Amino acid sequence: MPRHPHHADPGPAAGPPGAHDRPAPPPQPDTPAAPPPGTDPPPPAADPRRGVLLPLALAQFICSFAGSNMNVMINDISHDLDTTVQGVQVAITVFLLVMAALMIPGGKLTDRYGRKRCFLVGLVIYGIGALLSAASPGLGVLILGNSILEGVGTALLIPPVYILTTLFFTDVTSRARAFGAVMALGGIGAAAGPLIGGLITSAISWRAAFVFQALVVALIVLLSRRIRDPLPPDPDRPFDIQGAVLSAVGLTLLVMGILAADNNLWLTLGLLVAGALVLVRFFLTARAKERAGEEPLLSPSLFRNHTSNLGLVTQNIQWLVLMGTSFVVATYLQVVRGYDAVATGVIFTAATLGLLASSLAAERLARRHAQRTLIVTGFAVTAVGIGALIGLAGSSTRAIAYTPGLLLIGLGLGLMLTPSVNIVQSSFPEDQQGEISGLSRSVSNLGSSLGTAVAGTILVANLTSHAYAAAMGTLAGLAVVGLIAATRLPPGEPPGVRAEAEAAAGE
């Protein structure tokens, strides 16, 4: 755990003869000795947290932006690359899937090679993928650059974001503030991705949106020079290659099975069963390795923490709803209603403003309300927002009909993104932060991938208002599941109330 530099308290010094016969001087405060005359005072010790939060939050922003900005480019990309809406959906879903499949191995690699090193390597791979996507002549190269390379880069750089935030900000209030900043930019990246992507696409080209990502990545690399890894890497720490392969294959089969649902139900059933069997084998192998004294990729003991398990469920559903809504609404507006990229992006401004407002209030809300209260309220507001999108947007062709629902969804998600992450990360000690961070991000990105796959498949199978209502209804039902899971979280106390109680007990 990072500690601030401090001066050691020197022991008693031997005095001249007879010194002990004189009264002892009064105790002096523990302050640094004054510098000799004519010399400059020493500079104050640097706070190791200074300059850390901005590059970490920007990294979460650009990765979330990448997951949603393509939603408003569907028509432009499909026409330019001579592909279909389903082809672009596959590219988006595979990007989110690669992140989910590799996030747990990415979290474990931070222990072996260091958090900052993995962060920087991930940024470089991501930047290369963005530039390759910008120059892609066809869908295959776009999938290689955007879905594969950007996905791999994200899986390497995102776990360090949450590990470093947890290690640098150790008390509940400062950690809530730090996670609030990270999750705020992440949520804004996902919600504002359609607007920013739409503006860039209409003003220049959809390819310029990938150049924008590469430029932001270069800025993050420059800002990251001041980060100092608070824990040394452990190059001798084992890495479970078998577990990494099994987890990646299992998750891939599950998501690909969902994507195949509108083409072949038997293929879907086969892929889902195969994916489930591979994941069962993954957990059985991990348990056997742990019992044999070896270190598995993911310790089954992580799932013995009831609070963390519920927090992971809420994380998964939050991102499933966010990315599912973004894809369904953006696709429906462009393909069915005929909106262009800018008009679609402007409509999503309501969600961005709602998410920004509630995220900026995260620190104040965390001091006054228990984390369970914030998550429960967030799911309730989000479910009402989805209902408004179905009722108002489904019966009106005016763009303003989408504003109330998207605003409520943004407000609800902003309320609960930070406390869900904080609940999970704070449930484990420092030596398990790499493991739980990878699991937490994998669960969230799996939710993003499932949201695009499930709701997107329902919509793309039959692009009509009825399919739109069915897709959004599915997301509303899942939001209710998240609400039920949130009510099972322990009530807890607001950090502000707990801090006051501790202060009173110490008096």
Image (cartoon, grey):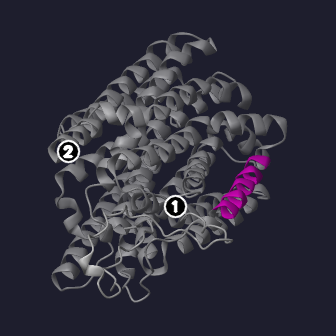
Determine if the magenta segment contains residue 159.
Answer: no
Badge 1: few (under 14), some or many (20 or more) residues near its Cα, within 10 Å?
A: few
Compared across the picture, whether 308 is left or right of 340 comes to: left
Indicate which disc residue 65 carries. Answer: none
Residue labelled with disc 1: 47
Over which residues does the magenta segment extend?
208-223
Task: Please name the predominant secondary structure of the magenta segment in the image.
Answer: helix
Q: Residue at x 63, y 47 (%)?
A: 88
Compared across the picture, whether 496 is left or right of 67 comes to: left
Determine if the magenta segment contains residue 213.
Answer: yes
Tell me the quarter of the image containing the N terminus.
bottom left
Seen in the picture, residue 35 relative to 400 is either above or below; the reply is: below
Residue labelled with disc 2: 502
Q: Which element is circle 1 on?
A: loop
Q: Residue at x 60, y 74 (%)?
A: 36
Q: Residue at x 51, y 27 (%)?
A: 357
> Do callouts 2 and 1 mark residues in contact (Cβ within 8 Å)?
no
Residue 264 visible, this angle: no
